[in-house]
Amino acid sequence: MTIDTLEIARELEAAGLDRKLAEAHAGVLLRAVTGAAASKADLENAVLRLEAKIDGDISRLEAKVDGDISRLEAKIDGDMSRLEAKIDGDMSRLEAKSDRDMSRLEARIDGRLAALEMRLFKYMIGQAAGIVGVLATLMFAAFRLLR
């Protein structure tokens, strides 16, 4: 952007300002405008600074996210270990209860089996006694016939 201070001073002088005052106003205007306006180099430098700041922010955020992920992974690992230990303990208690239940069931079965064996033995004794009685009767009858 170009500012023609001579043209500005002439316009101010034509408007009734003293020549020195018109030139002073034109100089102040030039300094105000050029001091506030950014050059292409200024803008390029600002862009570079912003890019560097953004890169730094991204690096800090990535490091934070990595740290958060590591902490979460460690927490999950700890939680998994506690759950595995609890499950192992629960399984051991269930196995012990199952073993006790099986032992009680085996004892009941053994008791019933012994009672059935005793009944069978008594029945067989009764049958044997009946057979012996029949044999004795037959033998007695045969003895009588043979005499």
Image (spheres, helix red, strand yellow):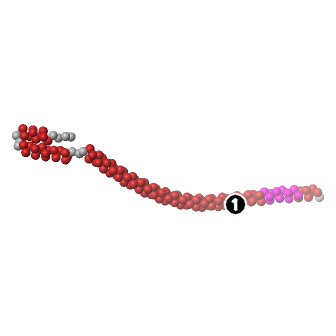
Any part of residue 79 in sight: no
- Place residue 104 in its image quadrant: bottom right
Q: Residue at x 26, y 44 (%)?
A: 40
Left/right placement of residue 53 relative to residue 138 reads left
* Range of magenta residues: 126-139
Outermost residue, right side: 147
- What kind of residue is marked 1? Ala
Q: Main secondary structure of the magenta part?
A: helix
Q: Can residue 104 be found in the magenta stretch?
A: no
- Place residue 137 in its image quadrant: bottom right
Q: Quadrant of the C terminus?
A: bottom right
Q: Can residue 130 be found in the magenta stretch?
A: yes
The picture places residue 95, in percent across and down from the top left corner, at 58, 59
The picture places residue 63, in percent across and down from the top left corner, at 39, 54
Left/right placement of residue 78 relative to residue 35 reads right
Any part of residue 105 in sight: yes
Q: Residue at x 80, y 58 (%)?
A: 128
In the displayed structure, 103 sits above or below 12; it is: below
Please name the residue that numbered disc 1 is placed on.
114
Q: Residue at x 91, y 56 (%)?
A: 142
Left/right placement of residue 120 relative to residue 92 reads right
The picture places residue 35, in percent across and down from the top left corner, at 19, 47
- Place residue 118 in its image quadrant: bottom right
Q: Residue at x 69, y 60 (%)?
A: 114
From the viewer's side, name the closer residue of 101 and 22: 22
Helix or strand or loop: what does disc 1 sit on? helix
